Amino acid sequence: MDLYARSDDSLISNLGLNNNSVSIPKKVQEVIRLKTISAVKDPANDPLFSTFWTIIDRTSKCMVGDLCFKGNPNELGEVEIGYGTHAEFQNKGLMTEAVGGLVHWALEQENVSCVWAETDPKNLASQKVLTNNNFEQVDATPENIYWRITKT
């Protein structure tokens, strides 16, 4: 996580990937430094629900995006996801596939009953990722659209 938060290509180099450069937004760097690293180290947290997952395209050997859970499932078994695709890899279906895999795994866990996500109303690509993965829109405000998929 520390290598990633540096945003200096040290993670790409460490993993032996082909990306020339991946720009990590300052907000994401701050979340990693201020929240994610300490959450992963906290023994009360399941590290699988506390870390970032990097998506690597096997063919190009490039880092194409990231996704995460935003913490442990709550007492109702609900867990929230977040995700982002690096600009040059957007609109290729990669995040749809990655979110599908993450959600499938999450809903197989005994302590998870529902996966949540939120999107900006203007972010049509993110909304498409969720609708392609059978999320249903459950609420909306001017700032966010809220989505969920439940265990069947």
Image (cartoon, grey):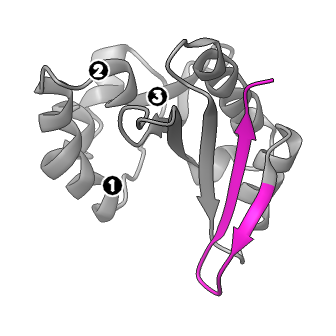
Residue 10 x %, y %: 24, 31
Q: Is residue 22 left or right of residue 152?
A: left
- Residue 101, by quadrant, is top right
What label does residue 47 carry, if any?
Answer: 2
Q: Write the start and end of the magenta stretch as one range.
A: 137-152
Mark 1 is on which residue type? Val
Q: Residue at x 65, y 82 (%)?
A: 141
- In this rendering, the answer to whether 98 lies above or below 115 is above
Residue 97 x %, y %: 75, 28
Q: Magenta stretch containing residue 143, yes or no?
A: yes
- Residue 51, by quadrant, is top left
User: Taking the image as drawn, is residue 122 in sight?
Assistant: yes
Closer to the eye: label 3 or 2: 2
Closer to the eye: label 2 or 1: 2
Between 21 and 40, the residue placed more toward the observer is: 40
Mark nearer the N terminus (2 vs 1): 1
Pointers 3 and 2 in contact (C-beta within 8 Å): no
Mark 3 is on which residue type? Thr
Main secondary structure of the magenta stretch: strand
- In this rendering, the answer to whether 82 lies above or below 139 is above
Q: Residue at x 35, y 38 (%)?
A: 71
In three-dimensional space, the C-alpha distance between marks 3 and 1, rounded to whole angstroms, equals 13 Å
Residue 105 x %, y %: 62, 16
Q: Which residue is the site of mark 3?
A: 54
Residue 48 x %, y %: 37, 19
What label does residue 28 carry, if any?
Answer: 1
